[in-house]
Image: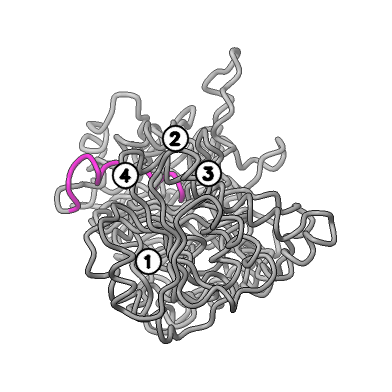
Amino acid sequence: MRVITAAEMGTADDKSVEMGVPVATLMENAGTAVARFVEARFAGLHSVVVLCGKGNNGGDGMVAARKLAESDHAVRVVLLGEAKDLRGDPQAAWERAAHEVDCVEVSDEDSLRDALADTSLVIDAVVGTGFKPPLRGLAMTARDVLRELAVPVVAVDLPSGWDADSTGQTNDEAFRADAVVTFATPKFAHVFGALTRDDIFSPLVVAPIGTPDGALKSDTRLHWTGAAKAIAEKPRGANGNKGKFGHVLIIGGAFGKAGAPSMASLASMRTGAGLTTCAVPKEIVPTVAAIAPELMLTPLEEGQSGLSLDNLRPEKLEALLKGKTVLAIGPGLGTEGTTPEFVKQLLQHVELPMVIDADALNALAGYTDLLKQAAREKGRTIVLTPHPGEMARLIGGTVKDVESDRIGLARKFATEHGVTLVLKGWRTLVAHPDGHIGVNTTGNPAMAKGGSGDILTGIVAAMLAQYGDVKQGGDVAQAVEAAVFLHGLAGDFACLAQDEHTVLATDTVAYLRDAFKLRVTDSNGFTWIQGGAAR
């Protein structure tokens, strides 16, 4: 599902008309979708006010009002301004609505307050994707009045006041919203902005309205990660066996850091890898083994400080890698002594797809040319999963450098080095070697705990092992994006079941079952960009 700009959405509407789908039809379908969402999500609220502007967004709201009235809701359309100023399709929508529902025009704060009296739900259809801030006049007054009302607000397309092209997280000048229904495909603000009062669990859905696929063209090279989850929704064959679902090898751990490789291994097994082996320093093998009886262990030799390079002798390395599908390295590895050199040599000599995280990333700071040699020049699958601090060390910069242009930096690094880069944070980015970027919209602050990155490493490795083997028709990009989406979604389920203070990284693993079961598109045809775990 593409993420497009406001201008591209406008072009798509024009192209739809050329392809035989007039604006009036798109408006009718959009308003119908809003009404269906309100009926499904707010079934007990029958007194509805639809606040409408003079443009197409207002026309969508007028259609929604008609449709809700047909379902026995008490509906009032409130036009901000005078009906004589309406033109084209919005004018036609107003005239039709006026025959079926209570329609009023307001020109000041007092008349607006009177029109909103006794409502139990407000639909915000003032301005949408075509709007450029700031709000002015009566629209700004309506925003302030709505903030005082203790009723839910459903935004049509966008909460009025948001710039559809915004990549900012917040906008204090916009209308508040408790749910958002947009159409055809998300815009930048839908995937990057905190559009609702509950930034994590309130609904933000995309409704199909008949826009032809051929009309939706975009040059952003951005898309939504949730669509990739479809690869994990096809049932396994009845003749499946563990050999068909990959063998993940996780290398990590050091004294005092046995938990990290343990968690990554547990996540790999829970995500569906046929087999998981964890290779750790021999002194912590008993600790790691206790995580699950299904886990296989391989002891690694330690030197006086760090992992011994003796582990990389050809016969030992061959035995370690035999039968493995994907290698993940980094969780709890440490950076002492010979360990960084161990990581660099392993990267140079292993042909398996690799997931590189945590201390393995730190070992490559200043040596990213090795990544380019392995991925770009040798054609290997390399996935990096840095948080902003690790990314800053990789590029020899600061966290501020990373955060100032996350999209541009992620795309540049991925394309130059030929890697898949998972840049973690608010709206984690999955940047691919071809320059395309997936934007993830799951996850919450409860996951800001030690171990979350280790869990993600295990999930990514397991998804690669099952779905990322290009020789077997797999898709690396989809496997990694699905992994990131599932990890955040499992964290959302965990937070809803507990509290953001109490969730542990291993709790997220327990809720992978719910994440796998959830379908991002519900029975009403709405695709849930946000809030899926709470629906």
Tell me where residue 208 appears, x and y as whole percent: 62, 48
Disc 4 versus disc 3: nearer the observer: 4
Residue nearest the observer in this picture, 32 or 384: 32
> Picture coordinates of residue 506 (x, y %)?
25, 41
Reply yes or no: does residue 384 show up in magenta: no
Q: Is residue 430 above or below residue 477?
A: below
Residue type highlighted by circle 2: Leu
The residue that label 4 is drawn on is 45
Residue that carries the numbered disc 1 in the rendered image? 194
Residue beneath label 2, please?
Answer: 518
Which is nearer the N-term, disc 1 or disc 2? 1
State how far apart marks 4 and 3 are (Cα).
20 Å
Mark 2 vs 4, N-terminal side: 4
How packed mark 4 is, by other alpha carbons closer than 10 Å (few <14, some 14-19, many 20 or more), is: some
Closest to the camera, between mark 3 and mark 2, is 3
Q: Secondary structure at mark 2?
A: loop
Q: Disc 4 vs disc 1: which is toward the camera?
A: 4
In the displayed structure image, the side of residue 353 where residue 35 appears, left or right: left
Q: Please tell me whether mark 4 sits on a helix, a strand or a loop.
A: loop
Q: Amino acid at mark 3?
A: Phe
- In this picture, residue 244 sits left or right of residue 488: right
Q: Earlier in the sequence, mark 1 or mark 3?
A: 1
- Choose top left, top right, bottom left or bottom right for residue 497: top left
